[in-house]
Each structure stands twice: as structure tokens, then as C-alpha cells.
Amino acid sequence: MPSLCFDKANDRFEWIGDYYSKDIPKGAGFRWDPREKVWWSDRKDSAVKLVSYADTSCKKMLTDYLRSIETTLVASKAVDADIDVQSPDGLDYLPFQLAGIAFMQSRRNTLLGDEMGLGKTVEALGFINSDSSIKKVLIICPASLKINWAMEAQRWLVKEWNIEIVTRCFPVPKKSGIVIINYDVLKKYTDAIRAIEWDLLIADEIHLCKNSKAQRTRQVLGHKPKKGSDEIEISPIPAKRKAFLTGTPLVNRPIELWTIISALAPQTFPTFWNFVTTYCNATKGEYGWDFTGASNLDELQEKLRSSIMIRRLKSEVLKELPPKRRQVIEMPDISGTRAVADENAAWEQREDLLNDLKVAVELSKASDDPEDYREAVADLREAAQAAFTEISKLRHATALAKLPYVIEHVREIILSGNKVVVFAHHHDVINRLHEEFGVAAVKLTGKMSIKARQASVDRFQEDSDVMLFVGQTQAAGLGITLTAASHVVFAELDWVPGTITQAEDRLHRKGQEESVLVQHLVLEGSLDAHMAQVLVDKQEVLDAVLDNLTNTLEQEEPIFPTATVGATSTTSKQKIKKLAEKLTMSDVKLVHGAIEMLAGMCDGAMAQDGHGFNKIDTMVGKSLAGMATLSKKQAAMGLRICQKYQKQLFHYYGNEDELITLFEKIGTKKKGKKK
């Protein structure tokens, strides 16, 4: 009677049987040992196929292995986890993100394959927060995402980290640190990178390493030349743990996975030939071997999930996602032009006038006459329109400078199998995008006829081969339905929040079954970079406003760069009213005194204690401080400023405890603590 046993001396499974039973172990992937004259395997996934033949001790080993596989399979699809992971004040992980962190905790290497837009970056940073042993981290990503990774790390990491983006030299972390580098320059710093044993290697968009012959692949995963080759051997980047991120881990051509998964799970995927014959339908033709086919894909997915991969779809975690998710992706400006510098210089020339009008808008929020607010917003819009018209040529140059990044980003979305809508303003930007993606794209601009516009919408909605809709924000931002996509990218930014919200709502409307992901692609230091974050913050506030009239009015208020954004800029008129209702007259006096103290300290730039003061805050604060008395609404505005400048205020002001008590009373987040 044939049987399967485990040979501890040789650390392998062995088949005990006569010659006529050889096809059984052979079919399970066992190999023949001519010296010992026995069929053997050192792989549990091969041995488990013969578990019915196993002896008692071997059967227990394989049963435990099967149980662990089942546990991992369940974890690879989990949408919640009962773990505690630290997060910064005001930020929380979604349940499925906690499940992703738990999966990473349970293994040395992970392929984090959640669908695009679910927050893989947050999960990776959450994993760092969850493990105090992680001291040195190398993050590899496309050049366009380096700044975004640094910003997200600063936002989500709970302890102080030295975060360095590689530019001209490679920074060597001493005791701890995070180094962010792009794939394109890895070769230049190969020795410096390999001189460090990293606690964690994060490789974002790892599908870029699917080609084993590509330099970036060899620099990340290593390369061992064939015998007799004059190629140089490259060792893999040394790391105790690895987390590879991609929104497209499951492809139609499994061969594209080989370089990645063999690096993460060499025990599960030990040999190239076994992989290509099992999963790539390898065939030999007239011109050699063809590995571009696909076979046993269900088995491949199960093997990936039972070893290294966790992947959830938006449809699986939809209840956890808000109706809209907004992101600002800031990219480095390596265009070699002066586009960003020129538009900022032009803006500075018009800034003082607009600041005065902005202050008038802020102060009008505390007025009991709604016409005051309407008139102030109208004046600001008129002046802003004139300013943006004057510098439109410069903003056009900036839009063209970032176009290659936009194309690259859109291509990644399409490769993930998702349709996408892109909004822009200038015709040449729209045309370049449309031409780049050919028959897979349609466009809609103000120059097109009504019939042609509708044809573009219909094709995008109904044709599965059309993956991209490129629309002019003004022409395509109203009246049409684009629910075939749940991902929208703004290649250029409008300065009125309402225009952007209306464009978003082409996707977020009746018939949309998924959460809509909104992304703003901006160049570092550009006007759009400053404005986009202000826009997102303002939209989050306005989304929560229930008063439709108030919402509509404030959606018309223009947005400006960060230098002109005050403490009350993202506080709605409705919110000011609600805060005022909570204040007593003694609270009003307390705030007035604090504002007078701040007004005496701030000069619009740097104060006595070395802390900067925002221009708008300075102007609004001094206006409030100069009043004989404050109304409750004016005090509510003053309280927002006090809250923002707690450090400066508490350094000199004697009523710190009273102010903190007031912050707690009205339910606003406080930065300081009682001494």
C-alpha cells in the first residue's frame, strides 16, 4: 500500500510505493532522487495533493498547513479586523484598511493589491505605525508620486520621522528615517541603497517591474545572469520585510506577474518553468516558446491569496466609503520651464486687492443681512475673474508642463480596467489627451455641436471599449451623465468650487453604484497646488451643510492660494451661525480679549515669538480687535482664529484654561493641553 511520509533528516516529503504507483507522486510535482531511489518534494503545496496517502504525523502536518491556507485565504478578502493601530488626531482607518494592516502584520512579504482608490498608501503607512521595530524604510515609486508619498507620510505617521526625498544625493538614515526615491534613478544610487539593511521596502505601482529585462526591475528585485553571460549580477534590495503595492495585480497575462511574485514568495513560486507551464499555457511554436497565454487562473489567484496577496474591490467595501473621496496629488515640476514661477509672480501682483475683498467676504459671514455676503462674494468674483483672465496664458503653460504626468496617471487607471473622466480647460490639453488614447477615448468641448457632444457621452456610457472621457469643464460640467465611471481626474482647476462640484456630479448622480474618487493633479508650488487643497477642504465643509441656499452661495465664493486662506475660509456662514448660538456674553468678552492680544502680536508675517501669521487672519483679526464690542457671530469668527493660533496666544495670554474650556464647550478640536 503506497504512503506519504515526512523525512526529518532530509527535511522533505517522500513517497513510499512501488514502480507502478510512480504516476501519483509525479503528477503532484514530486521529483525522482536516483541515489535514494525515491520520489520526493520539499514543498507542502505539492505534498498536500497526496494527503489521503499520508501517515499519521505527516497528515497532521499537512492538515495544519491546509488550515493555515484557509485562514490566509479568508484574511486576503477581509473587510474588517479587530486590531488597534495608532492614527493621528482627526484621522481614522476604515475597517477594510485595518484588515489590510493586519494581513501585512502576519507575513514577511505582502502584495497589497486593493483596487485603485481604496487607500493602499494609508494601509502601508498604518503598517509602519503598527510596528515599532520598523526604523528604516525605503519607498520606491514613480517620480510623479514622490511628493504625494511624503505628504501622506507626514499626515498619517504618528511619531516623528525624518522623511527624505532623493534628489541630488542619497540620504543615509542613521537610527531611523524614510527615504523616498523614484524607479528611474535607482541605478545611480544602487551601492548606497544596498549598503543599508532596510526594515521595510515599499514599492508602489510594482507592476512597473513586470519586465525582467527592464533596468528598474533588476534594480528592485535583483538579477542573476545566465552562465556565460557578460551581464552584471545585481542583488535584490536588502529588506527584512517587503510590501509591494499595485491596483492591477491580476492581469490577463500571468507571465507579467512572475518577476514580482517570485521575489515575494519564492517558496510558493520556486521555478519559472513550473509557473509558465501551469499558469501561462506555455507552448512551443515555430519561433520558440510562447508564454503570453493564460491557464488555471482560479488556481493562481487562490495560490496568491493563500501566500502573499490581499485584494479588495470597491464594490466589496462600498458601505465603508463616503459618496465622494477627494485627493490632491502633487507632482514635481521637472519640465525645465519657468511656468510655475511665472504664474506665482503674476499672482503676487494682484494679491493685495484680492486680499482686501477676501477679508470683506469673511467679515460679511457675521452679518445678519444676507445681502452683505452676496455683494461681497460678487465683488470678489468679479476681481478674481479679471485676475485669472490676465494670467490665463501663464496657467496654460503650467497645464502643458504637467500634461505628461496626467497622461501617465490616466494610463495607469485604464490599465487597471476602470473607465475614467478627465476635466480640463484648454483645448490643446484636451486634444492631446484625446489623441494619446485614440479610439479608447472620446471628448466633449464647447466647439462641438450638440449632436456630437451627445454622441461622445453615449459612446462613453455604452461602449465597453471606450475607457476615457475628456471634457472641457465649462462645457461638460453640466447636464450630462457619466456614471459609467466612478473615477474623475481634474487636469486643470477652476477657481469656483461650484464649477468643480458640478463637474464631479456628472459621475455622482442617479445610476452611480460606487463611491466616486475625485483626484486633482497639480505641480508642486503652482497656484493649482495651493488652491486644490483649499478647494477640497472647502468642499468637505460644504458637503456637510444642510442649508441648500447657504451651500449654493458659498460654492460661488472663489478659492485662492494658501497665502490668502484664513482660519475662517473653510468655515461656512451656517457654521458661524451655529457656533455663535453656543456662546454666552462672557464667552464673547473672552474671545474679544484674546483677539486683541493676537492683533497686538501679528504683523501679517512674523510675530514676536517667531511664529508666522496668515495675511487674511491678520487682516480679519485686526478688524475684529478694532471693534468696540463683538456680536456673537463676530466672536465665533474670532474664536476660529484663536483656535488656529493657540501656540502664539497661550505664550502670552493669561486665560489659557478658560479658552481651552471654551474650545471643549463648542466641540472644536484643540491643539493645546491644560498645563
Image: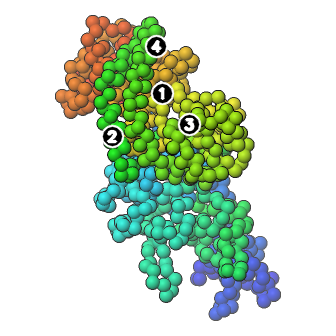
Q: Quadrant of the N terminus?
A: bottom right
Q: Residue at x 42, y 47 (%)?
A: 401
Q: Secondary structure at mark 3?
A: strand
- Amino acid type indicated by mark 4: Arg
The image's mark for residue 496 is 1
x, y percent for residue 532 = 45, 35
* Residue 546 visible: yes
Callout 1, which amino acid?
Answer: Val
Q: CA distance from mark 2 to mark 4?
A: 33 Å
- Disc 4 marks which residue? 374
- The kind of residue tagged 3 is Gln
- The secondary element bearing badge 1 is classed as loop
Foreground residue among 217 and 175: 217
In the image, residue 65 sits, relative to residue 496, either above or below, namely below
Residue drawn 44% across the image and 68% down it:
219
Q: Most extreme residue toward the bottom, as rendered? A: 35
Residue at the farthest left position: 608
According to the picture, the residue beneath numbered tag 3 turns out to be 472
Q: Give the CA distance from mark 4 to mark 1.
A: 15 Å
Nearer the observer, 23 or 426:
426
Task: Give residue 186's quadrant in the image.
Answer: bottom left
Disc 4 and disc 3: Cα gap in Å? 28 Å
Q: Return the residue at label 2.
A: 342
CA gap between label 2 and label 3 equals 24 Å
Residue 335 in percent (x, y) is at: 39, 51
Secondary structure type for disc 4: helix
Q: Nearer the viewer, residue 19 or 93?
A: 93
Which image quadrant for residue 351? top left
Q: Earlier in the sequence, mark 4 or mark 3?
A: 4
